[in-house]
Image: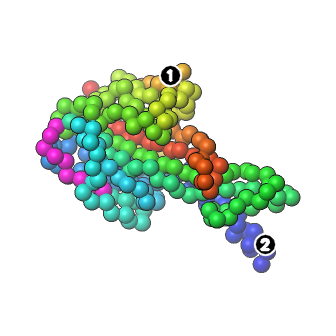
Amino acid sequence: MKPLNLLAGALAWAAAMAASAHTPYLAPSDFAPRPGQTVALDASFAETFFVPEAAFDDSRFSVTGPDGSSVAPDTVQTLKTRTVAEHTLPKAAGTYRFSTGPRLGALFRTWEVDGKRESSRDPATRIPAGAKVISDFQSLTLAETYVSVGAPDRGALAARGTGLEFVAATHPSDLYVGEHFEFIVQYDGKPLPAQKVEITEAVWTSDRKPHTETLLSDAQGRVRVTLRDAGTWLALSRYRTPAPAGAAVAEYSNSYTLTFHVLEQ
């Protein structure tokens, strides 16, 4: 039985690490809806965008309007591989930000005692005193996107000033091939220099490899994405921070994604 237990433990650890690599996304049915149109959104964790694998659950979805006020979507339904939200927009023109809200997810805790490696995702299990800590963090994820009715405006683009976020300099609803998309990566309102951002094409299928690009923010946290191809894209950044007092882990692994659409000139 011992070899089987060891194998089961190894498989569970491998599955947990694979899950940690999954990226959250929020994809709207339309980036330029009509006044009063109902927008549907898929929220999921995936390796290929947008092929859903695990539903984005246990969070509070929100819609921020042109005046900066936020409301809950009309409907949020959690399925096995994705969460589906629907919201009927008001007649007012402008830009709307859809957000999954932050979600605390899986714990990833691995340690060694006398050369023996153990793992646990149970918050009640503590790492033994004197153990060599391999990992001790919990995922904290947030996915967002913007849609614009008529001419885009900037009311919904205001920085929250908390957590990991992209603060748009170029409007996300005004992106064209041959131009650039600029935004600032920040955490708790402060720019993050030399922060890695991954840009990935959404291919909507698992049978084609997407185009990807990795960029670093400058000293002011600014990222400049060259828009070479039309289509839907996802920008991702991950950032480790100390967990708050009383948390079951030492660190949070913050992930933020922004889904955006690039148009032909």
N-term mark: 2 or 1: 2
Question: Where is residue 131 shown, x and y percent of the image?
Answer: 80, 55
Secondary element under disc 1, as helix, strand or loop, is: loop
Q: Quadrant of residue 151?
A: top left
Q: In the image, which residues are magenta?
A: 85-93
Give the residue type that dot 1 points to: Gln
The vertical placement of 88 against 159, above or below, is: below
- The color scheme shown is rainbow
Could you tell me if residue 49 is visible in this image?
no
- Quick one: 20 or 244, which is closer to the camera? 244
Residue at 75% across / 56% down in the picture?
Answer: 111
Q: Is residue 37 left or right of residue 194?
A: left
Image quadrant holding the C terminus, namely top left
For image coordinates 77% across by 78% down, the residue present is 1
x, y percent for residue 98: 32, 46
**Residue under label 1:** 220
The quadrant where residue 149 appears:
top left
Q: Is residue 46 above or below residue 183?
A: below
| Towards the viewer: 69 or 151 | 69
Would you name the residue on which mark 2 appears? 3
Residue 87: within the magenta? Answer: yes
Mark 1 surroundings within 10 Å by alpha-carbon count, few (fewer than 14), some (14 through 19), many (20 or more)? some
Q: Is residue 158 above or below residue 101?
A: above
Question: Which residue is outermost to the top?
Answer: 219
Amino acid type at image mark 2: Pro
Q: Is residue 258 left or right of residue 69?
A: right
